[in-house]
């Protein structure tokens, strides 16, 4: 530390690497507040260290997870798949845009939210072919264009060729959607 109580550039960059290794999804704004420096300083530090911006970090993590998916093609997943444990659970992020919302209210259309939930549920199932047999969904709170949706799916039970998957979607750690899906596994011929 320097006399002013701030970290030296070398120490700050070292700590920045540690923080991003623990959580690659920390924003520049959060890092700026954490280190009590400007966002531009954080961006310069990332540039010097060869660390991509948040959007690229998310895509890098997502690409590794898409390779694990068996039941659908990675490109068919709505949002970025940032964590996947086949047969257990997964997480995806969807950045909503004005094109997804009603122009009059700026509220995101429900089918975009449902699509994120359903595609994540299908992605976590460890099977070659899966179809949605039943879905029980509830929209708990409106989502505005620009909100970041974090979806978390968990396989809760497997009974025969039925896989029960619960999906919860959050905006700023507030649950806005929940869905219970029964995915039917189709045996390949």
Image (tube, rainbow, N blue to C red):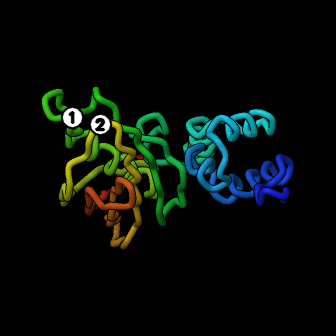
Occupied quadrant, residue 139: bottom left
Whether label 1 touches label 2, CB < 8 Å: yes
Q: Is residue 81 above or below residue 136?
A: above
153 to the left or right of 64: left
What residue appears at the point 43 percent right and 57 percent down from the top-left corner?
A: 125
Q: Secondary structure at mark 2?
A: loop
Percent coordinates x, y for residue 159 in the rendering:
33, 72
Quarter placement of the N terminus? bottom right
What residue appears at the point 67 percent right and 60 percent down from the top-left corner?
A: 22
How many residues crowd around disc 2 within 10 Å: few (fewer than 14), some, or many (20 or more)? many
**Of callouts 1 and 2, the N-terminal one:** 1
What residue appears at the point 76 percent right and 55 percent down from the top-left corner?
A: 6
* Total marks in image: 2
Regarding residue 115, the answer to whether it shows in the image is: yes
Percent coordinates x, y for residue 58 in the rendering:
57, 42
Mark seen at residue 47: none
Q: Secondary structure at mark 1?
A: loop
What residue appears at the point 41 percent right and 46 percent down from the top-left corner?
A: 189
Query: 33 or 123: which is nearer to us?
Result: 33
Percent coordinates x, y for residue 165 in the rendering:
34, 63
Regarding residue 187, the answer to whether it shows in the image is: no
> Please, which residue is most extreme toward the left here?
104
16 to the left or right of 164: right
The residue to which callout 2 is attached is: 145
Q: Is residue 174 above or below residue 62?
A: below
Percent coordinates x, y for residue 41 in the rendering:
70, 38
Mark seen at residue 106: 1
Alpha-carbon distance for marks 1 and 2? 6 Å
How many residues crowd around disc 1 within 10 Å: few (fewer than 14), some, or many (20 or more)? some
């Amino acid at each position: 530390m320097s006399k002013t109580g701030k970290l030296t550039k070398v120490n700050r960059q070292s700590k920045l690497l540690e923080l991003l290794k623990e959580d690659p999804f920390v924003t520049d704004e959060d890092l700026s507040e954490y280190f009590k420096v400007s966002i531009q300083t954080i961006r310069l530090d990332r540039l010097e260290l060869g660390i991509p911006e948040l959007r690229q970090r998310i895509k890098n993590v997502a690409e590794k997870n898409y390779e694990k998916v068996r039941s659908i093609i990675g490109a068919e997943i709505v949002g970025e798949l940032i964590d996947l444990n086949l047969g257990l659970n997964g997480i995806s992020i969807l950045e909503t845009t004005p094109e997804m919302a009603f122009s009059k209210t700026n509220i995101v259309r429900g089918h975009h939210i449902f699509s994120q939930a359903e595609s994540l549920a299908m992605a976590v199932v460890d099977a070659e072919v899966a179809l949605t047999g039943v879905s029980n969904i509830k929209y708990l709170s409106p989502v505005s264009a620009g909100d970041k949706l974090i979806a978390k799916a968990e396989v809760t039970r497997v009974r025969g060729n039925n896989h029960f998957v619960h999906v919860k979607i959050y905006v700023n750690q507030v649950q806005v959607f929940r869905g219970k899906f029964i995915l039917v596994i189709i045996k390949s011929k």
